[in-house]
Amino acid sequence: RCCTGKPFRRQVESRAFIALAVWGLFTVYRTMLVLGSVTEQMLHNADGRDASHAERLVRVFNFLILISVALTPSFGRFIDTHGMAAGLALVNALGVLTFGLLVTRPDWSLYVAFLAFGCFRAWNYSLMTAYSMGVFGGASFGKVYGIGVGTVSCLAAAAQYPTMAIVLGGSKPNFEGLDWAMLGVGVVVFGFPVFVHSRTVEGKKGGAAAAAAANAA
């Protein structure tokens, strides 16, 4: 709760807010990219597939991404036990796994990618909500979430059209290069869980120091 009670402008200028906005931009962009391109990816990735095969994979995708609903209580217990930073790291790892497997050929590996993506998508929004509320407080939650997540979501959505136009505009459409790039982005944004963990450790040390000072007094 490092930013709770601060004026809204100072909250927006804080490292905690900037980190949230960067995380939101790249996670939401990756989410929208998969949702908007899954049909084309099944058609063109891994040396291509025929239309009926791609259509079947998309139907499986639409089913498997819903499995995250059943797994969410277990994820909640994971957060209660291991904390926010561990939850963010797990979610980002699922995103990295998704893009690493979307370029593969076997159906079973794509099924794993679809399931990982469903959890990545659902749990990420839950974590961004919890982070915004926990760090900035309820009084400014709407404004913080609206700017830190809502605005960057609009930017991520706006970037989808030029992305698709570039990838599909070539003589032989292929998303594999983009998928590998998104995997690399996912590795970089592990910096956000590391940042959250460091702030958590600092907060615990500060609380312990304050308690020790109070006891000494």
Image (spheres, helix red, strand yellow):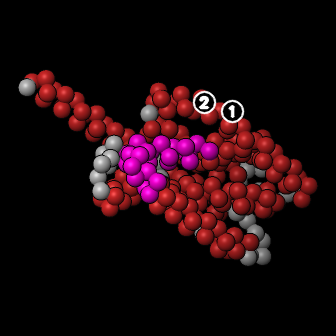
Work out whether 130 lies above or below 143: above
Horizontal and vertical percent position of residue 99: 64, 52
Q: Which residues are magenta?
A: 122-144
Whether residue 118 can be seen here: yes
User: Is mark 2 in CB contact (under 8 Å) with mark 1?
Assistant: no
Horizontal and vertical percent position of residue 24: 51, 56
Please identify the residue farthest to the top as the structure is shown: 215
Work out whether 136 lies above or below 166: above
- The residue located at (44%, 33%) in the rendering is 83
Q: Quadrant of residue 113?
A: top right
Dot label at residue 162: none
The answer to whether residue 202 is left or right of residue 85 is: left
Dot label at residue 73: 2
- The residue located at (68%, 37%) in the rendering is 69
How crowded is the residue under tag 2: few (<14 C-alpha within 10 Å), some, or many (20+)?
Answer: few
Q: Which residue is mark 1?
A: 70
**Nearer to the camera, 163 or 2:** 2
The answer to whether residue 39 is left or right of residue 115 is: right
Horizontal and vertical percent position of residue 204: 28, 33
- The residue located at (34%, 38%) in the rendering is 200
Amino acid beneath label 2: Pro
